[in-house]
Image (spheres, rainbow, N blue to C red):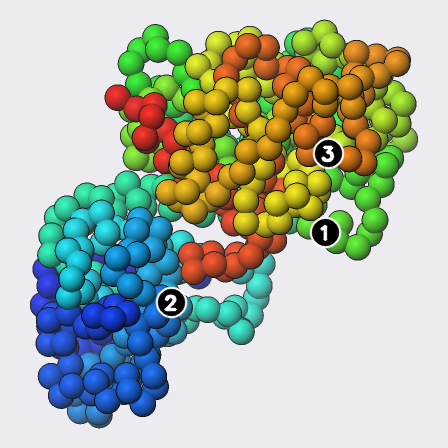
């Protein structure tokens, strides 16, 4: 991985060396502290020549004369000051990193003429910069070609702001969440030969250093519990499945926890209902839901969230050999309900149904939210800018939607209803695992709903947002880490203290 930038905060001053970054707003331009970095007023002329207006995400770079202490002056457009919300500050941070190139000594002057930039805003900029700095080049022996890098040097970036102590405090939490996102990205980006169910469990175990209680159920233990649906998916692979249970007890002792459940299919061939070869390499990311849950647990523990939280992930490899389940097989889930497996490539719901039932029975949570790269149908419906949201509880759905708007990890609610149950009724078992061509994402959610009883529950279909999603100012990686910031915000706003 490229070296992470070293981030610090200090009082606003006029830097004398290295690269200096200033902010310029659309309509209002530079603030006083930013102008003090350019006593010769070079920016004024440069802005006119380059037609630089301060539009959001734009930048302008000036090389300084030889013999001076500064190397470069960089202006970053922030857009209109009236539009600077929480996510806009993060995008500014991403734009700053993109403009730095190989700078190793950077001062960012956080100053605008009509906006007070407090600790939360400064921390947002720094957090966005940290997320943009991520790159997955672990397996490249020739690094840095054709990609954003700060070279082999570690960039030292000082954010100069009005209240550095408040910014430092706010950044400690922002960094914890960003590191959770980065962990999720790492997991999604790992190749399947390096990250199977056993290795995934080992990565989750590392959270114990943050105070997370991690236990792992083996194939033998799951068999005793009757998890026939999950085990049926795993039986075609020589790599054994694992059910990983993570507990963070940061709330009041004895309070019922909130729960997050993730689909962890570390590679999905489709089984006997084999996927086409084209694009199958992307199925290393079919554990994006599980990655998000692990990243979320890291974020909550690292920032010491005042909540009791359970994270559960079912990890399997859906492979094919002589032992793999066949279309038409009937399996018995932990709930006792039977499932006719008509398509072995609709395997994620088989993993999740046992994980959800186990979570509900073992922990009696206040609510359960599951995340899964579950269906291509949700991408047909929503594209790659929203995850599909299905829920049996309006309050939980509304809170998830609001958290998505705040973090820009957006969700859109999709319908559930008894009429869709007919799509998965089976003549040979209690249900079948596919519902036909139409409403594929809905019938998958309707399937999961049969395993949550009356517990408030939401299902997030993140097939279009967890991997291969459009790049943004804060993410240039194939694995996005989608869901970590969304769910951290949900917990922070409604379930702490």
Badge 2: few (under 14), some or many (20 or more) residues near its Cα, within 10 Å?
A: some
Residue at 61 percent across and 53 percent down: it is 468
Write down the quadrant of residue 418 in the picture. Answer: top right
Describe residue 113's horizontal placement relative to residue 463 as left or right: left
Task: Say if 334 sits above or below 57 in the image.
Answer: above
Q: Position of residue 281 (x, y in %)?
A: 72, 51
Badge 3: few (under 14), some or many (20 or more) residues near its Cα, within 10 Å?
A: some
Write down the residue under mark 1: 281
**Element on which disc 1 rests:** helix
Describe residue 157's horizontal placement relative to residue 240 as left or right: left
Q: Position of residue 232 (x, y in %)?
A: 77, 22
Separation (CA) of disc 1 from disc 2: 33 Å
Separation (CA) of disc 2 from disc 3: 38 Å
Task: Say if 408 sits above or below 218 in the image.
Answer: below
Q: Quadrant of the C terminus?
A: top left
Res 255 visible: yes
Residue at 83 percent across and 23 percent down: it is 341
Task: Say if 243 sits above or below 474 in the image.
Answer: above
Task: Say if 449 sits above or below 63 in the image.
Answer: above
Badge 1: few (under 14), some or many (20 or more) residues near its Cα, within 10 Å?
A: few
Of 468 and 184, the residue lying toward us: 468
Q: Which mark is residue 57?
A: 2
Write down the residue under mark 3: 439
Q: Nearer the viewer, mark 2 or mark 3?
A: 3
* Among the two numbered marks 1 and 3 on one chain, the one whose residue lies closer to the N terminus: 1
Separation (CA) of disc 1 from disc 3: 26 Å
Q: Which mark is residue 106?
A: none
Q: Position of residue 81 (x, y in %)?
A: 25, 61
Describe residue 23's horizontal placement relative to residue 325 as left or right: left
């Amino acid at each position: 991985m490229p070296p992470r930038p070293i981030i610090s905060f200090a009082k606003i001053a006029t830097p004398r060396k290295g690269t200096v970054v200033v902010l310029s707003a659309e309509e209002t331009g530079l603030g006083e502290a930013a102008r003090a970095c350019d006593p010769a007023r070079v920016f004024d002329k440069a802005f006119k020549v380059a037609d630089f207006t301060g539009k959001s995400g734009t930048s302008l770079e000036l090389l300084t004369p030889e013999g001076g202490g500064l190397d470069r002056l960089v202006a970053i457009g922030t857009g209109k000051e009236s539009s600077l919300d929480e996510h806009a500050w993060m995008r500014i941070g991403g734009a700053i990193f993109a403009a730095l190139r190989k700078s190793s000594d950077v001062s960012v002057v956080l100053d605008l003429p009509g906006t007070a930039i407090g600790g939360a805003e400064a921390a947002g900029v720094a957090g966005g910069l940290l997320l943009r700095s991520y790159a997955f080049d672990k397996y490249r022996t020739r690094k840095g070609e054709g990609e954003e890098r700060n070279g082999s040097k570690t960039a030292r970036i000082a954010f100069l702001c009005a209240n550095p102590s408040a910014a430092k405090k706010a950044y400690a939490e922002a960094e914890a969440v960003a590191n959770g996102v980065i962990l999720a990205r790492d997991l999604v980006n790992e190749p399947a030969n390096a990250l199977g169910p056993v290795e995934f469990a080992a990565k989750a175990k590392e959270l114990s250093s943050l105070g997370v209680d991690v236990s792992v159920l083996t194939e033998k233990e799951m068999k005793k519990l009757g998890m026939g649906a999950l085990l049926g998916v795993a039986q075609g692979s020589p790599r054994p499945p694992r059910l990983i249970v993570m507990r963070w007890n940061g709330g009041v002792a004895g309070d019922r926890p909130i729960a997050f459940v993730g689909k962890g299919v570390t590679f999905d061939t489709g089984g006997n209902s084999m996927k086409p070869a084209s694009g199958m390499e992307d199925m290393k990311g079919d554990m994006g839901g599980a990655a998000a849950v692990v990243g979320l647990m890291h974020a909550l523990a690292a920032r010491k969230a005042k909540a009791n939280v359970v994270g559960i992930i079912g990890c399997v490899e859906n492979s094919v050999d002589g032992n793999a389940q066949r279309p038409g097989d009937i399996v018995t889930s932990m709930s006792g309900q039977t499932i006719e497996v008509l398509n072995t490539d609709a395997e994620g719901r088989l993993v999740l149904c046992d994980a959800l039932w186990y979570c509900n029975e073992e922990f009696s949570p206040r609510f359960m939210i599951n995340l899964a790269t579950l269906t291509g149908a949700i991408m047909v419906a929503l594209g790659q800018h929203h995850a599909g949201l299905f829920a049996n509880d309006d309050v939980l759905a509304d809170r998830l939607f609001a958290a998505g708007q705040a973090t820009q990890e957006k969700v859109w609610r999709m319908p559930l209803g008894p009429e869709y149950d007919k799509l998965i009724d089976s003549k040979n078992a209690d249900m079948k695992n596919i519902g036909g061509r139409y409403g594929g994402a809905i019938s998958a959610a309707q399937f999961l709903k049969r395993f949550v009883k009356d517990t408030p529950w939401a299902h997030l279909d993140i097939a279009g947002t967890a991997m291969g999603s459009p790049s943004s100012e804060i993410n240039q990686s194939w694995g996005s880490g989608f869901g970590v910031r969304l769910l951290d915000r949900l917990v922070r706003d409604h379930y702490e203290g």
